[in-house]
Image: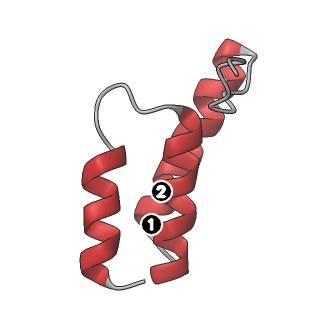
Amino acid sequence: MSYAEAMHIAERTLLDGATLSELKQASMDLRALTPDSALADLVDAKVEFIESQKGCFDTGDTGAG
């Protein structure tokens, strides 16, 4: 994945209202580009914090269909 592709993905997914699944995927994509990414570490820590506070895990699955 190129830097430009990673930035395009980030623009689409790192917006208000992004699901935890989208943030997790963005973190994984960023790690594929930059394995020691401090930004990915920050995203992962924030996701873990949110999950521990809510006691739930967002899979992105709405159950529809």
Identify residue type, mark 2.
Answer: Ala
- Residue under numbered circle 2: 26
Q: Residue furthest bottom?
A: 2
Residue 58, position as x, y percentages in the image = 66, 27
**Category of crowding for the residue at label 2, using alpha-carbon neighbours closer than 10 angstroms: few (below 14), some (14–19), many (at least 20):** many
- The mark total stands at 2
Q: Does residue 55 sit above or below 19 in this rendering?
A: above
Residue 12, position as x, y percentages in the image = 29, 49
Residue 42, position as x, y percentages in the image = 47, 52
Q: Which of 65 and 42 is in front in this view?
A: 65
Q: Quadrant of residue 64?
A: top right
2 vs 46, left or right, is left
Residue at 25% x, 53% y is 11
- Residue under numbered circle 1: 38
Q: Quadrant of residue 53?
A: top right
Q: Does residue 51 sit above or below 36 in this rendering?
A: above
Task: Give the spatial CA distance, label 1 vs label 2.
Answer: 13 Å
Q: Does residue 49 sit above or below 9 in this rendering?
A: above
38 vs 13, left or right, is right
- Looking at the figure, which quarter contains the N terminus? bottom left
Residue at 48% x, 49% y is 43
